Image: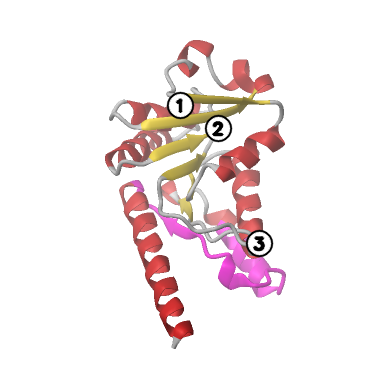
């Protein structure tokens, strides 16, 4: 069954627990956090308080927003400090990565992927896979800071051209280089989807 579509209330952000080499990555994390708070939305993220993860959470909290951190017990001391975790207004500690990812999906109405490593890549690819399988219609965004995701996007295009991405209309993440455009684009996409479904419902009754 397809995940029921609801208005955008929360945004899940996948990103690195390291800062990366380009200062633009941390800056983008803070800016995205600020934008999420400014639009009255909740951040759902992996609970880390270091690297880009910490920058996003700090950006939300510094501007009065709400943050839900979801982190496995074994990562608490690796990706966070217990003092910093106490500043989140909601913290969920899971028993493993599988439970963490499932809870992040359940609590999120859209997904944004900032620069990160293998774990970040794995998270957004799983969400794309679920979209392809018809499990959800939640907006997905690659925050393509400085072209970071270009190699990944080229691979997806290659797989599509070689016939390995079926039902491609269900796998259409937005690619947005300017972090300030991300939240408005998600909200616009949500409004368009709601309007389209409303029209379809009216037509079906004729």
- The percent coordinates of residue 112 (x first, y second) are 47, 47
- Residue appearing at x 49%, y 27% in the figure: 51
For the C terminus, give its image quadrant: bottom left
Gap in angstroms between the C-alphas marked 1 and 3: 35 Å
Q: Is residue 157 magenta?
A: yes
Q: Nearer the viewer, residue 132 or 1?
A: 1
- Check disc 3: other Cα within 10 Å, few if <14, some if 14-19, many if 20+: few
- The percent coordinates of residue 25 (x first, y second) are 43, 37
- Residue appearing at x 39%, y 62% in the figure: 189
The answer to whether residue 27 is left or right of residue 119 is: left
Q: Which residues are magenta?
A: 153-179
- Check disc 1: other Cα within 10 Å, few if <14, some if 14-19, many if 20+: many
Check disc 2 and report the residue beneath it.
46
Which mark is in front, 2 or 3? 3
Check disc 3 and report the residue beneath it.
1
- Residue appearing at x 27%, y 40% in the figure: 38
Q: Nearer the viewer, residue 117 or 185?
A: 185
Gap in angstroms between the C-alphas marked 2 and 1: 10 Å
Q: Is residue 134 magenta?
A: no
- The percent coordinates of residue 126 (x first, y second) are 65, 51
Gap in angstroms between the C-alphas marked 2 and 3: 26 Å
Check disc 1 and report the residue beneath it.
54
């Amino acid at each position: 069954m397809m995940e029921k579509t609801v208005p955008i209330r929360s945004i899940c952000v996948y990103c690195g627990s390291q800062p990366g080499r380009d200062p633009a990555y941390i800056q983008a994390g803070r800016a995205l956090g600020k934008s999420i708070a400014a639009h009255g939305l909740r951040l759902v993220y992996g609970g880390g308080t270091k690297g880009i993860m910490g920058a996003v959470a700090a950006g939300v909290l510094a501007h009065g927003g709400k943050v839900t951190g979801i982190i496995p017990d074994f990562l608490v001391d690796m990706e966070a400090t217990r003092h910093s975790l106490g500043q989140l207004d909601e913290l969920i500690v899971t028993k493993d990565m599988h439970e963490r990812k499932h809870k992040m999906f359940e609590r999120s109405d859209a997904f944004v992927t900032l620069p990160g490593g293998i774990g970040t890549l794995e998270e957004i690819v799983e969400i794309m896979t679920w979209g392809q399988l018809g499990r959800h219609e939640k907006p997905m965004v690659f925050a393509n800071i400085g072209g970071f995701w270009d190699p990944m996007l080229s691979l997806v295009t290659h797989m599509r051209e070689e016939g390995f991405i079926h039902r491609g209309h269900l796998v259409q993440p937005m690619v947005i280089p300017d972090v300030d455009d991300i939240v408005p684009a998600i909200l616009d996409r949500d409004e368009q989807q709601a309007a389209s479904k409303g029209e379809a419902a009216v037509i079906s009754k004729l």
